[in-house]
Image: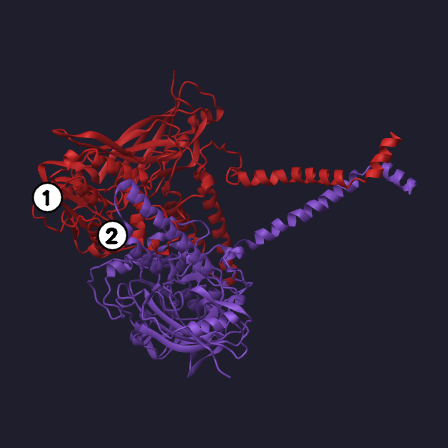
Chain colours: A purple, B red
Amino acid sequence: MKNHIYIFPLSTIFQIAVSFSPSIIPQPDLKQMGSAANGAAVDMDTSTSNGSASVDKGVDFANYFCTYAFLYHQKEMLSDRVRMDAYYNSVFKNKHHFIGKTVLDVGTGSGILAIWSAQAGAKKVYAVEATKMADHARELVKANNLHGIVEVIEGSIEDITLPEKVDVIISEWMGYFLLRESMFDSVICARDRWLKPTGVMYPSHARMWLAPIRSGLSDHKMSDYEGCMDDWHGFVNDTKSYYGVDMSVLTKPFSEEQKKYYLQNSLWNSLHPNQVVGTPTILKEIDCLKVTVEEILKVQAVVSSTIVKEDTRLCGFGGWFDVHFKGREEDPAECEVELTTAPSVDDVTHWGQQVFLLHPPVRVNEKDDIQISFTMSRSEENHRLMKVDLAYQIKLSSDVKSKAKMHRSSSATTFRTSDEYFLNLLPPGKAAKPPPDDDLPVYNPISPNGSKEHYNSSRENTIHLIPLVLLLCGFILWFFSYPIDVLKDNHITM
Amino acid sequence: MKNHIYIFPLSTIFQIAVSFSPSIIPQPDLKQMGSAANGAAVDMDTSTSNGSASVDKGVDFANYFCTYAFLYHQKEMLSDRVRMDAYYNSVFKNKHHFIGKTVLDVGTGSGILAIWSAQAGAKKVYAVEATKMADHARELVKANNLHGIVEVIEGSIEDITLPEKVDVIISEWMGYFLLRESMFDSVICARDRWLKPTGVMYPSHARMWLAPIRSGLSDHKMSDYEGCMDDWHGFVNDTKSYYGVDMSVLTKPFSEEQKKYYLQNSLWNSLHPNQVVGTPTILKEIDCLKVTVEEILKVQAVVSSTIVKEDTRLCGFGGWFDVHFKGREEDPAECEVELTTAPSVDDVTHWGQQVFLLHPPVRVNEKDDIQISFTMSRSEENHRLMKVDLAYQIKLSSDVKSKAKMHRSSSATTFRTSDEYFLNLLPPGKAAKPPPDDDLPVYNPISPNGSKEHYNSSRENTIHLIPLVLLLCGFILWFFSYPIDVLKDNHITM
């Protein structure tokens, strides 16, 4: 049996944002957390080894750290029950790692992990925080009567000095799709400087996952893009006729800008498990005790996934991570804990998933095999930004049902895009979140005109009920308004 | 006749954003234009005189200039017909200022003003642009066959050198509420370095305006804030009961953060003229030929406004600007042109207005007099951010109708807030834009429970129609379903 092979380039710029979902109330200042990217020829002053050219500490603080100085942001993270439960259980179900021990909390934020460590029995906890949130952490520690144990230190982990080495390093360092923010660098630095040779990492292991998905967002974005280009053409015409300037030379650059920064931009999304149409696959496994910064500068993997749904659409790929609390081999956890950010109905996290969309989506079928070549590295412009290069090919299963597939297979050429796509680490804000209906877990067939009927399906269902309700009400009204004597008459005349 | 006097502090943090409205399609990368503020202890390297402590050029480029490197942003500005018409007319109706002259365009962006200047007859135009947009400007100049006249220079105006002094400086330097972005500093610098003593400024004059307004946004924001605090209290309880940590010590800082960064944040808004409830008043007049940077570091004014609507709400103040193209006294414009960003039905600009909201709004009446003390200065953290200090007092007109007013007057104390409020220059994004109904030009009475009936009024009206529609349909169904013979029978038996 011969496999038909398609190869398509996957064009996606990640939009991986600061690890919080929008606050309960609109927060205009969320934008203060943005980072620079396009066109920013930033002066670089302070060099550190992070895979990017160099890091200006001022820029880094302005664009990154300041995010964590807001309480509402801390609250968002502290309200993530999956995250909180995992860390809470990891500490309190493994008290033997904490009782009488020294602990370092890297990036303590509000101080919650440091407080739990102390409550679990640590004799000393160093809680290091780079932002002014350190003041709030100090207050919180005091209010919880742990100021004898927890010492909050304001400063970056790379700069501060501890009086001793520690038994445990605990940290919630994970960004969207695990490595966004590159905060793990700081944890590695802390480990190499301050962890005893017998020390334990909390969490101890981490994994990155990728899976084929279906999603209405792909059509949505393409339609937005087309509308935007239509608008551009109108703009070019208007500018020529009203203002005598021919802008058409900018049409190509504009279209490229839109593709690069809109179409090829990955999205934060909270996927429903039904949207995962193929077997999830591991891109990277990290042993937090052993990994080096060099080993996470670039994540490279060739993996495969099998489609598990019948006659569906491959609209892109979803990426997520999990971390585990297993202790170390010689000193394992009594109770291993897992924190997963996989698509879930009940255990949704603020990390959600990162979605890399295909334009256009591709029809696939059960047992089709997808080979994915994945590379993620850091942006030259900002070491907290990532570039992602994805290519994939589809091997059809023997059960070739679709004529369209046959046609495609014969016209496909084998190439692999060499473009680099940005894993953009900026905060999602409201705009980056799709309207809820975009995420319908149920399958949405592609109609010939690329319709978006699925976006408003719930509303449409309601509308469809109206005639029925009207009929029912009409009937009830008719029934009760029926004159009794007429009924009687009818009865009599029968 | 005695005037009753109230004095209320006005607590508003400006949220003045980069001068564009959201693009046609969602632009996740808009967030890349954010700047740092809270908690950002930015290293300052390069000092320049701008009223703020000092400016790190890297941070400044990352947070500010990069914005202008996007074509979609240029397109937003180029699609602002009010802006375009004003500059176009100012140039082409005053060709005598351009024919055979040398022109400098400060911050040329796409190059449009430089191109117009050349088309109007300039013999040489220097088009200076700090970002990579310079490349696109160069292409555009070439495509319009003006590369013999327009020379695009990539660099900041403070750093570059021209081979000669110029006759005209043209620039579109105005930010939200005129001075946001502090770009005018660069124009002043250009003028002092490169304008001939007989030279002309385009525009030549500028004014800042303020007026009392009514708006549903005030209730909206307060309700959001209250919801947010309710949510916080739930969060504190949950964290205590589920995770054994008492967060209540952070309640006050959280509330203060929400007030400072949400409630006391000014908003971009496109006001309807009907929302202006008092006479607009001028805060600042600028002669672009003479003004110094020192004179715009701080805008300070005590002004008064008279309420012009009967029994209405003072919900806050709206700020806007206008600029004029008058040439210079010895060399005036043949045709004076005005570009105003005042509230308007037809001539809406991308600048809109800045809205400073009151919490809660205050009842006012026709002929009430409002005295406003206004101070705007630059933030220490970012010279492109502003701090605004506003205080006002209401002198009641003789026609005291409202009992509530009498009560208030007797309980009011005379004080003036000394807090500083931020004029936050960040881009509005989608979140900062209110839902359309928030901006109802019609007056929304305050109901006792501070209801928001006006937000969903259209939806509610529809819902209220449903019973009527049902009755009607029921009646129709009933009528047509009525058995003819029964009717007949009825008729007979009557």
- Label whose residue precedes the other's in the sequence (1 or 2): 2
**Disc 2: which chain?**
B
Tell me the distance, in whole angstroms, between the alpha carbons under discs 1 and 2.
Answer: 22 Å
The amino acid beneath tag 1 is Arg
Name the residue rendered at 38%, 72% in the picture.
A391
The amino acid beneath tag 2 is Phe
From the image, tell me which residue sits under label 1.
Answer: B193
- Residue B317 at x, y percent in the picture: 36, 34
**The C terminus of chain B lies in quadrant:** top right
Near mark 2 (Cα within 10 A), the count class, few <14, some 14-19 or many ≥20, is many
Near mark 1 (Cα within 10 A), the count class, few <14, some 14-19 or many ≥20, is some
Badge 1 marks a residue whose secondary structure is helix
- The label shown at residue B10 is none
- The label shown at residue B65 is 2
Q: Is residue A60 left or right of residue A209?
A: left
Q: Is residue B60 left or right of residue B448?
A: left
Which residue is more in the foreground, A100 or B438? B438
Q: Residue furthest top?
A: B1
Q: Are marks 1 and 2 in contact (CB under 8 Å)?
A: no
- Residue A271 at x, y percent in the picture: 49, 64
- Residue A455 at x, y percent in the picture: 52, 55
Name the residue rendered at 89%, 38% in the picture.
A489
**Disc 1: which chain?**
B
Which residue is more in the foreground, A25 or A308? A308
